[in-house]
Image (cartoon, grey):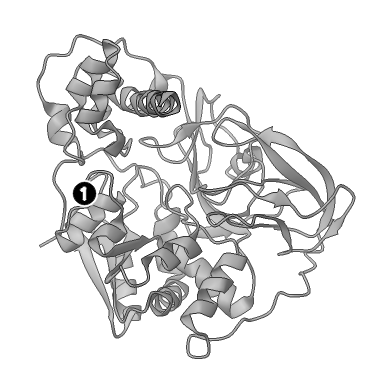
Amino acid sequence: MALTFRGGVHPDDMKRATSAKALEPMNAPETVVLPVSMHIGAPCEPLVSVGDAVFLGQKVADSSAAVSSPVHSPVSGTVTAIEPRLHPNGNLVQSIIIENDFFDTPAPDIEPRGTLESLSGERIIEIIREAGIVGLGGAGFPTHVKIRSGIGKVDTLIINCAECEPYITSGYRGMIEHTSEIIGGIRLVMKALGLTGAVIAVEANKPDAVEKLTQAAGDGIRVCVLRTKYPQGGEKQLIQAVTGRQVPPGGLPADVGCAVFNPETCAAVWRAVTTGLPLVTCNVTVAGSAVANPKNLICRIGTPVESLFAAAGGFSVEPQKLINGGPMMGVALYSMQTPVVKTTNALLAFTKKEVERFKPQQCIHCGRCVSACPMDLVPLYINMYYSKGMIRELEGLNVTDCIECGSCAYICPARLPLTQVCRTGKTLLGELKKKENAAK
């Protein structure tokens, strides 16, 4: 019986356009734009200056902060500018701009670091840190920090192969095409955490991925099948489905003995150890109704968004909206010059008809949002308190536990912008608490 969690919704997965299309390597662009912050934590400081020559895989930005992750050049070439550029999150972020010389001359220190048998757990963590690897399935939390903070606390390692967002198949193709690298990376993470086992969790709509991963898994690694439902790939929902444990409000997976990793993060760990190459590429699904030839691409980090859409045949019709990520949790893009960052896994383009705005109606208290919420929240009351300016009261409704999955807004018959209300409510509550603490 497939495992699952309470709540959730069942949108059309819209994966048919790209699920059978293999990952296709893209030509590197003439210029790459590298924001010094592509992760949760402190931004990096540039280690290069304008005019410097750089190599493929060279570290170009780093930070001494405990929670951060270095940035590496995905090409060889020359630094032409260091200035604020538009980030996919909509902000201007200090960025390093490198003109590609198209030689891909590797940095002198790019070489294999060792093997699973030869490396200690501590050395594996150091290699992951120096390779700039972050969580590639979510917000980009530095992988070395997650592992180090989980040692002694985590007894269950879960590999999140759900990929439940509509349209996105870049991870699915990686499961099929990079199977051995994923398994190798899982074993390295297991050693770093001091564990002897791991669970690979895959949704039931990916039977070929289940088969390939099961065949490659070997001793200590178990593959379990999840019921196809959104947001099955949510970290807390995945833990509940696989282990039956529930992360408490405000808690972290480690609080219930779990650590969750993305399969491509594991593959990046394997590559960093076996080749010495840091994280300089990512897998991206380019799809949506406005895209002429949807594809799954392997591109260099820092590539402008417009280059990926061009590689997918451009637009069959003029797009009305561009999204970085999936349609449920993705972020609207304001410029085609925005670069791909470490956490980019999809770029979607939609027609005007698909993004028509609906005028919100009166809430009828049907409770569908409550039934759909995977975090056991009550979105209709959050919306009621928010609309009346009762921000402090949102804390009692656990608004900060909202994972912004969009299930409530998707299911609401009144078309209320419930996800946006929760997102804004969390921000306002945080600002209010800061003011109250400063006044003490």
Of 303 and 115, the residue lying toward us: 115
Answer whether residue 415 is visible to the viewer in this image.
Answer: no
**Residue farthest toward the bottom in the current orientation of the protein:** 118
Residue 433, given in percent of the width and then of the height, sits at: 37, 27
| Location of residue 170 by image quarter | bottom left
Circle 1 residue = 248
Q: Is residue 72 left or right of residue 99?
A: left
Answer whether residue 124 is visible to the viewer in this image.
Answer: yes
Residue 130, given in percent of the width and then of the height, sits at: 62, 67
**Residue farthest toward the front in the current orientation of the protein:** 440
Q: Secondary structure at mark 1?
A: loop
Q: Is residue 10 left or right of residue 36?
A: left
Of 67 and 300, the residue lying toward us: 67
Residue at image position (20%, 41%) is 374
Q: Is residue 171 left or right of residue 54?
A: left
Of 291 and 284, the residue lying toward us: 284
Residue at image position (30%, 60%) is 254
Q: Amino acid at mark 1?
A: Pro
* Above-or-below relation of 439 to 198: above
Residue at image position (47%, 53%) is 141
* Above-or-below relation of 278 to 33: below
Q: Which quadrant is home to the N terminus?
A: bottom left
Residue at image position (33%, 78%) is 195
Residue 39, given in percent of the width and then of the height, sits at: 54, 49
Question: How many numbered marks appear?
Answer: 1
How busy is the neighbourhood of tag 1: few (under 14 within 10 Å), some, or many (20 plus)?
A: few
